[in-house]
Amino acid sequence: MTGRSARQLRVQHNISKYVFQQVDVFSSQPLKGNPLAVVVGADALTDRQMASFANWTNLSETTFLLQPTTGDADYRVRIFTPARELPFAGHPTLGSCHVWLASGGKSKGSEIVQECEAGLIRIRRDGDRLSFAAPRLNRCGPVEPEMLARIVKGLRLAEDAIVDANWVDSGPGWMAVLLHSREDLLALRPDFGVISGLRVGVVAPWHAAEDGRDADFEVRAFTAAGFEDPVTGSLNAGLARWLIGSGIAPRAYVASQGTVLGRAGRVHVEQVGGEIWIGGAVTSCIEGTAIL
């Protein structure tokens, strides 16, 4: 194809170039966290274009940075899985903020304010770490007996293996179970056919003598789409409200996630007053141009 023909095709299909980054969230080491694709300055893209690009990247989430619609926000983000749009998600929030800052974004105040479908999310910087204020839970309380029985079967657990279970839904629809030990958690090999359509988080304490002191809890996230998520901000946000609120966890702790998948995600949790902050490092892995 000649240069002129290529230019004509680009004009005909209204193709444009956008700044693009792929980052690793909840890890200071490349390839050890949860990847996120981010398109900058995406205001001209249609819903269909965004959904199609997210489907093509085939990452758990792809985000698009836009101008805010309210003066209270510094930027706006839209968050897409390969199949649908999400109102809020944790690792896309931190990864999008990292890219926004790297692209020259300047906050109006001491905190950064992200606008998304779920509302305004406050983000703070602490050295190389970014943290978001966990949103209130849409749903909390005990998991229904019939649902819990399905989870027990799907995770191939004995009934006495579960210490407790709770809804921890901050938007995506997570429920969670607490196990006795990290060893039990890492041994899980779920039957995704049984838990299809459910978002099941599993958490267990680290025991210093056996597991070391690098973290306080281990987390795994089994998605409704039938795969394990490497490191999950929204789940950890819901877990923090449950674990701290019930006295299971201290006001500040570190969660490890992604171990079974060969990752080394670290989620830093801190309660300050009535707020819970979910934080971690973000590392840029790919920078370039997206042609959409």
Image (tube, helix red, strand yellow):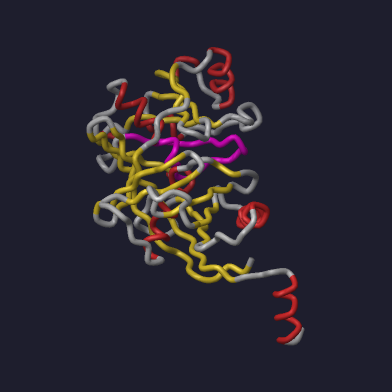
Q: Is residue 175 left or right of residue 111?
A: right
Q: Quadrant of the C terminus?
A: bottom right
Residue 59, position in %: x, y? 57, 52
Q: Is residue 18 left or right of residue 270?
A: right
The correct choice, above or below, for 101 with respect to 222 in the image is below
Furthest-front residue in view?
Answer: 71
Q: Nearer the viewer, residue 112 or 231?
A: 112
The residue located at (41%, 18%) in the rendering is: 164
The residue located at (34%, 53%) in the rendering is: 281
Residue 77, position in %: x, y? 49, 51
Determine if the magenta segment contains residue 222. Answer: yes
The answer to whether residue 219 shows anywhere in this view is: yes
Q: Quadrant of residue 190?
A: top right
The correct choice, above or below, for 255 with respect to 284 in the image is above
Q: Nearer the viewer, residue 280 or 137?
A: 137
The residue located at (49%, 61%) in the rendering is: 22
The answer to whether residue 264 shows anywhere in this view is: no
Q: Quadrant of residue 83?
A: top right
Residue 142, position in %: x, y? 45, 16
Q: Quadrant of residue 276?
A: top left
Number of numbered tags placed on the structure image? 0
Residue 233, position in %: x, y? 42, 41
Q: Is residue 6 left or right of residue 23?
A: right
The residue located at (38%, 29%) in the rendering is: 204
Residues in magenta, as a range: 217-236
Furthest-top residue in view?
Answer: 145
Determine if the magenta segment contains residue 101. Answer: no
